[in-house]
Image (cartoon, rainbow, N blue to C red):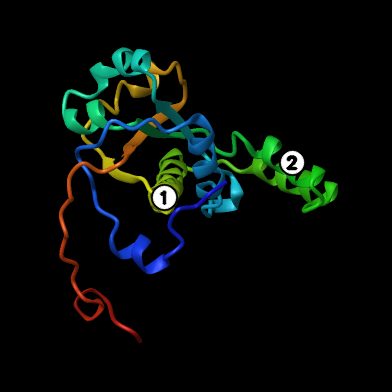
Amino acid sequence: MTITNNHFDDIMKNRRSIRKYKEVEITDHTIKAIFELALRAPSANNLQPWTFRVIKSKAAKDQFSHLFKWNRSQYETSSAMIIVLVDTRFASRAPQIYDKAVSQGSMSIEVRDRQLENFKKQNPNPLDVLKTAYLDAGLVAMNIMLTARSFGYDTCPIGGFDRLNAPLAFGLENHEAVMAISIGVADDFGNNSVRLDFDQVGQIH
């Protein structure tokens, strides 16, 4: 795996929201390599409620085009469009995650069983579950965009698409769509957005 940009300051400071891309193909291998790193994002209780669908082929772009009545330039020119969704069920993947942790030796069977039993006893407010899932989705989405830049690709986070019907379009039950992320090689410069200084938005106590 070749990372084309290891300059942290450049990755952070020069990321732009790009709305037009060059006609460049990103291989499935590269997309999976980006996700391999991006999925290291933190997640509450390591429950990883995120789900992704990558619209990449021409057939897929045609099939899911109806979800993008807006932001057409990003959709039509990007090498791929990543849809970030969350599972609205609490701890739905906990057995799978913790079984993997046990198999890799990073968790004991006793800890796994105790934790899974604790989850079964909990009855969290569905709104709290959703809020936590959205927080996790935001963390992993930012990781995706920064990791993509380290591979030499540009991105744009998108909220303006048919999020209500996106889960149905992908045949996903118990899911909500959070955002889309276009990815490709920039064919414009993006906006050099101004950020307020820390002293204007924060305090150290």
The C terminus - image quarter:
bottom left
Which residue occupies 39% across, 49% down?
152
Query: Which mark is on residue 31?
Result: none
Query: Residue 127's x, y, as percent?
Result: 40, 41
Can residue 50 be seen?
no
Distance (Cα) linking label 2 and label 1: 23 Å
Looking at this view, is 165 or 141 the one in front? 141
Which residue occupies 81% across, 42% down?
103
Q: Is residue 85 above or below residue 171?
A: below
* Residue type (three-letter) at the residue carrying disc 2: Lys
Query: Which mark is on residue 100?
Result: 2
Q: Is residue 9 left or right of residue 111?
A: left
Q: Look at the numbered disc 2 and give the secondary structure of its residue.
A: helix
The residue where tag 1 is placed is 135
Looking at this view, is 142 or 117 the one in front? 142
Query: Residue 133's x, y, as percent?
Result: 45, 43
Marks 2, 1: nearer the viewer: 2
* Residue type (three-letter) at the residue carrying disc 1: Leu
Query: Residue 107's x, y, as percent?
Result: 78, 52
Q: Quadrant of residue 5?
A: bottom left
Q: Residues within 10 Å of mark 2 (few under 14, many from 20)?
A: few
Looking at this view, is 139 or 64 the one in front? 64
Q: Is residue 45 left or right of residue 85?
A: right
Looking at this view, is 154 or 200 the one in front? 154
Which residue occupies 38% across, 17% down?
168
Q: Residues within 10 Å of mark 1 (few under 14, many from 20)?
A: some
Q: Earlier in the sequence, mark 2 or mark 1?
A: 2
